[in-house]
Amino acid sequence: MSRYKVNVKVELIECDDSEQGDLTKNLDGSFSITMSEQDAVSIDKVDSSVLQTAYPAMREAVSKHLTEISKKSL
């Protein structure tokens, strides 16, 4: 029986983006959100932004995985 590994990478990177607050799907398939420096020092704001960004990435990964598994079992 196969085994599956789950990899997750979260980065908080200083940037010069002028837009903030909107969730964006990037060209590489990752998701990002930009927050102000004031929000970046608040554990609650950082936690909320990380979870808001991670959720669509997790849903997309699970959907892709289950689609591939269903095709494999045909």
Image: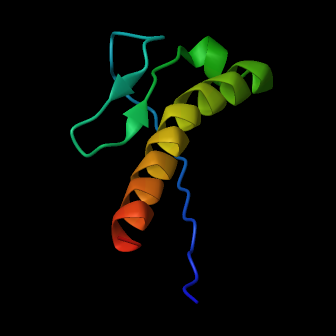
Residue 4 position, x and y percent, is 56, 76
- Is residue 67 visible from the viewing direction of this image? yes
The residue that appears at 39% across and 55% down in the rendered structure is 67
Q: 59 or 68, which lies in front?
A: 68
Residue at 78 percent of width and 26 percent of height = 43
Q: From this viewpoint, which residue is outermost toward the bottom?
A: 1
Q: Measured along the vertical axis of the image, is residue 24 above or below residue 68?
A: above
Horizontally, residue 63 falls left or right of residue 8, namely left
> In the rendering, at what x and y percent does residue 62 appear?
51, 50
Which residue shows up at 63% across the image and 13% down it?
38
Give the image location of residue 68, x and y in percent: 37, 62
Q: Residue furthest right?
A: 44
Question: Vertically, is 29 above or below 56?
Answer: below
In this rendering, the answer to whether 56 lies above or below 64 is above
Outermost residue on the left side: it is 27
- Residue at image position (70%, 19%) is 45
| Colouring convention used in this rendered image of the protein | rainbow
Query: Is residue 73 found left or right of 35 in the rendered image?
Result: left
21 with respect to 1 (left or right):
left
Which of the 4 image quarters holds residue 17?
A: top left
Residue 49 occupies which quadrant of the picture?
top right
Say left or right for 66 vs 6.
left
